[in-house]
Each structure stands twice: as structure tokens, then as C-alpha cells.
Image: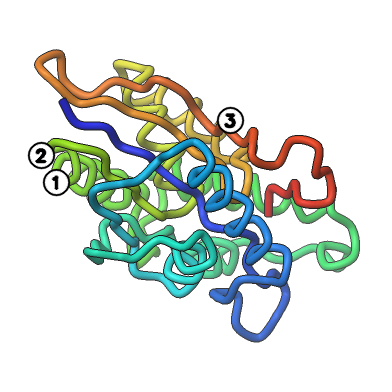
């Protein structure tokens, strides 16, 4: 039986020139995860990175040595997705306005009616599903450092049978993924099953370390 630990990266540098860099908080979140894993004796046999800088830096902060890079676990291009919808003037200063803008842009992308994206939502979900299949082919414990979008899709695809329900569930799960949160899957004779989603007990008692973006 295989065990998969899907780790969302620590907080990236939202609003900076290079988003794909962990913030100071992101490094702390990764370190907190590594500390609790060491205390619990969690030692992955393999560590897969989605290939983005924030994935690698999270693994490093947690004290994990990446043994494989699989771009199938990379996040979707949120910048390109947002660029298809005019940005409200208040989006930078008002979190609620930004969230509304993000959700409108997400709905446009996942709706599949527009084909002006370099990677469609269908292509995104196909590559994440393929990456999951590759990772699940191994026995032992595999830690996968990735992003909220892929983690939310894996969970949605395992919990729902039809595409519309999966897409709706993806939206709901993606917005609540915690930075450095861990989702636990097992793979065996009964296929791949979700055991837990978005576990973040390593942040308990540390409210300053909790973030969603």
C-alpha cells in the first residue's frame, strides 16, 4: 500500500514582483511542518516537488530533500486566468473585492466556454490526475509539495463521480486550502482514497502562522 502526503506550499509573495518566492511567513510555515513531522516520526521515502520555486523552498524549510520533480503538480497560471477579466480598481486594497474578482475569473476558466487560455481547466485537471497516477504507482510514503489548485482537484476528483460536481467541489476546496496544510491519501487494491484533507495541526496555537494566500 502506498501513502501520499500532499503538502501545500507555504505562503508565497503575493503582490511582489516575483510571486513564486516564499514570504517570511511561508518559510515559518514550512519549518513548523517539518518540526511536527520530526516529532511524529514522519519520514517520507520520496519527496516530489511540483517544480515551482515556492514548492522547493517549502520542502527546504521543512527539512525535506526533493528526490523528484514532476511538473504535473505545478499550479495553474492564476495571473493568466485573472488577466481575462478586468480588475476592479479596489482589488489591491480590499480583500473582499479581490476575492470576488478571483471567483469571477475562476468561474470563467472552469466553465470551459472560453478557449483563450494557454491551459484550459480540462487540461489542468488531466495533468494533475496523471501526476497522481504516477505518484500512486510507488509503495511507501511519498510527500508531494504542490499547490492548492492541484490538491483541491485531487480531493474533488476522489469525492465526486461526475465532472460538474467535481468542478463545484474544486472551487469550494481551493478557497480554503491552508498554506503548508497536508492532505493524506492511501493507494492500494481499492484504488486511491482520500483519508484527510487540509490538516494543519502543526499551526495550532500559532494563529499568526495561519494563512490561505
Write down the residue under mark 2: 137
Count neighbours of disc 1 (C-alpha within 10 A) and say few if under 14, some if 14 to 19, many if 20 or more: few
Q: For mark 1, give the secondary structure.
A: helix
Which part of the image, by quadrant, shows the N terminus? top left
Write down the residue under mark 1: 134
Write down the residue under mark 3: 172
Mark number for residue 36?
Answer: none
Who's the residue at 69% across and 48% down the image? 212
Q: Is residue 68 visible?
A: yes
3D distance between C-alphas at marks 1 and 2 = 5 Å
Seen from the viewer's position, the closer of residues 140 and 83 is: 140
Who's the residue at 44% across and 43% down the image? 110
For marks 1 and 3, the one nearer the N-term is 1
Q: Is residue 207 above or below residue 82?
A: above
Q: Relative to 172, is 71 on the left or the right?
A: left
Q: Are marks 1 and 2 in contact (CB under 8 Å)?
A: yes
Q: For mark 2, give the secondary structure.
A: loop
Q: Are marks 3 and 2 in contact (CB under 8 Å)?
A: no
Q: For mark 3, give the secondary structure.
A: helix
Amino acid at each position: 500500500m502506498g501513502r501520499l502526503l500532499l503538502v501545500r506550499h507555504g505562503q508565497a509573495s503575493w503582490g511582489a514582483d516575483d510571486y513564486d518566492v516564499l514570504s517570511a511567513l511561508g518559510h515559518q510555515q514550512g519549518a513548523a511542518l517539518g518540526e511536527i513531522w520530526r516529532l511524529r516520526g514522519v519520514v517520507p521515502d520520496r519527496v516530489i516537488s511540483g517544480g515551482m520555486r515556492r514548492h522547493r523552498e517549502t520542502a527546504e524549510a521543512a527539512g525535506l530533500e526533493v528526490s523528484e520533480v514532476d511538473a504535473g503538480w505545478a499550479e495553474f497560471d492564476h495571473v493568466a486566468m485573472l488577466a481575462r477579466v478586468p480588475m476592479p480598481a479596489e482589488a489591491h486594497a480590499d480583500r473582499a473585492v479581490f476575492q470576488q474578482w478571483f471567483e469571477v475569473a475562476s468561474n470563467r476558466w472552469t466553465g470551459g466556454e472560453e478557449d483563450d487560455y494557454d491551459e484550459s481547466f480540462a487540461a489542468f485537471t488531466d495533468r494533475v490526475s496523471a501526476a497522481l497516477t504516477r505518484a500512486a504507482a510507488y509503495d511507501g510514503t511519498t510527500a508531494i509539495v504542490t499547490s492548492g489548485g492541484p490538491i483541491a482537484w485531487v480531493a474533488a476528483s476522489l469525492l465526486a463521480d461526475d465532472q460538474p460536481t467535481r468542478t463545484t467541489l474544486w472551487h469550494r476546496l481551493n478557497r480554503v486550502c491552508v498554506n503548508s496544510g497536508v492532505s493524506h491519501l492511501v493507494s492500494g487494491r481499492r484504488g486511491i482514497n482520500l483519508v484527510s484533507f487540509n490538516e494543519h495541526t502543526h499551526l495550532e496555537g500559532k494563529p499568526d502562522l495561519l494563512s490561505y494566500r
